[in-house]
Amino acid sequence: MKFEIIDNFLPNDKWQENYNLFMTEDIKWTYKSVPQDPTSFFFQYIFTGFSNRYSQDEVSFISPADNIQEKEIPHYTTAIEPILKNFKYKTHFYSFTRTENQISKILEVSEKNSNAIVLYTIVDNKLARHLSNECSSKNIPCFGILGDLIISFSKLLDQKALNVPSRQHIMDDEYYKKIEAIQFTMNHDDGNSVEDIEKSDIILLGVSRTSKTPTSIYLANKGMKISNIPLVNENSVPNILKENPQKKCVVGLTAEPDRLVDLRKNRMQSIKDNESTEYTSLDIVQKEMEDARKLFQKYKWPSIDVTRKSVEETAASVLKIHDIFNQK
């Protein structure tokens, strides 16, 4: 079952900036341009009753969460910034809020800020009710960001919400599979450890700067064991793959020579090597790419042109090829 979110919540430019950050394979997120009705904006709706109170003075957002880590905080505030541009505000984040004692200490901070507003993402119902009651008794506006969303999705999916914090970080079999895949992929990067290449789920081949390593790491985070091998000539390919070319899922990565030359020049500049070499020669790169394509055709390995593809798009194409390979 898949869902599509039609977004008129963020301004278009902000939506574009954060599209890759939030999009997943299961939830398609698209932008829909509609007239800006204040009631369609979540935070504008929240502050309808408080606009006079907060319009002149600085607002303090007190944000307790039971699982948000520091490095994730900028993503959490992205939705606030474009909507509250007429407000002066500062934020106070409290990650891993799990006890009533922590709530009490947080609200002490809130009371010291005359214009405090509490926005929380606590999923534990008991703790969320305690926070709401305490805020009510202290006359502090308090809003649960996830409450209605969880209820709506529970009804839509016909499932009862577990309301357990940090379930996304549970170290289950899938977690350890991902860790193992990442470790394997790191050990088999750039042609290393080819002696056990048969343990790979996918093998990527390509000349230099065809996004082999970033694509491998991205796929490893999906739980796939990846080996990537840089192509110099046919001798670069392990014999085990040439002897039985269809035994493993092998995918070739190609790119337009002009684009590769630019990438290689940038690479040389980054390591302060500005000498003109065969590595950045257009004629040499064209020959490399021609030989690579002939090699892929010879062994009937599918290939992907990564010239205009992001790492995510390349990885998605690789996974489709892997699925087809496993159906044989």
Image (tube, rainbow, N blue to C red):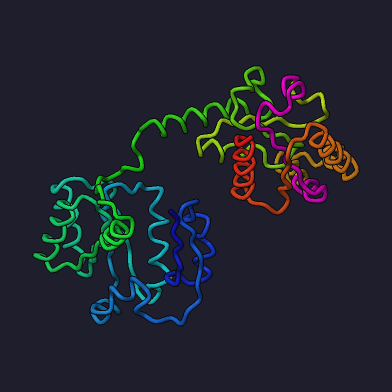
Residue sitting farthest toward the top? 195
Note whether 129 is above or below 316 in the view shown: below
Residue shown at 36% from the left, 32% from the top: 172
Q: Position of residue 226 (x, y in %)?
A: 60, 31
The answer to whether residue 108 of the structure is visible from this angle is: no
The foreground one among 324 and 160 is 324
The foreground one among 257 and 168 is 168
Q: Position of residue 77 (x, y in %)?
A: 38, 61
Residue sitting farthest toward the right? 283
Q: Along the horizontal axis of the image, is 2 left or right of 215?
A: left
What residue span does the magenta drawing correspond to?
Answer: 239-263
Note whether 164 is above or below 90 in the view shown: above
Q: Position of residue 299 (x, y in %)?
A: 79, 31
Q: Along the horizontal axis of the image, is 295 left or right of 197?
A: right
Is 157 magenta? The answer is: no
Residue shown at 73% from the left, 40% from the top: 302
Note whether 179 is above or below 271 in the view shown: above
Is 262 magenta? The answer is: yes
Instruction: Classify residue 93 by image quadrant.
Output: bottom left
Q: Quadrant of the C terminus?
A: top right
Residue shown at 13% from the left, 55% from the top: 130
Instruction: Classify residue 242 by image quadrant.
Output: top right
Q: Along the horizontal axis of the image, is 247 left or right of 94?
A: right
Residue sitting farthest toward the left? 137
Q: Position of residue 87 (x, y in %)?
A: 35, 74
Q: Along the horizontal axis of the image, is 311 left or right of 263?
A: left
The answer to whether residue 164 of the structure is visible from this angle is: yes
Q: How many marks?
A: 0
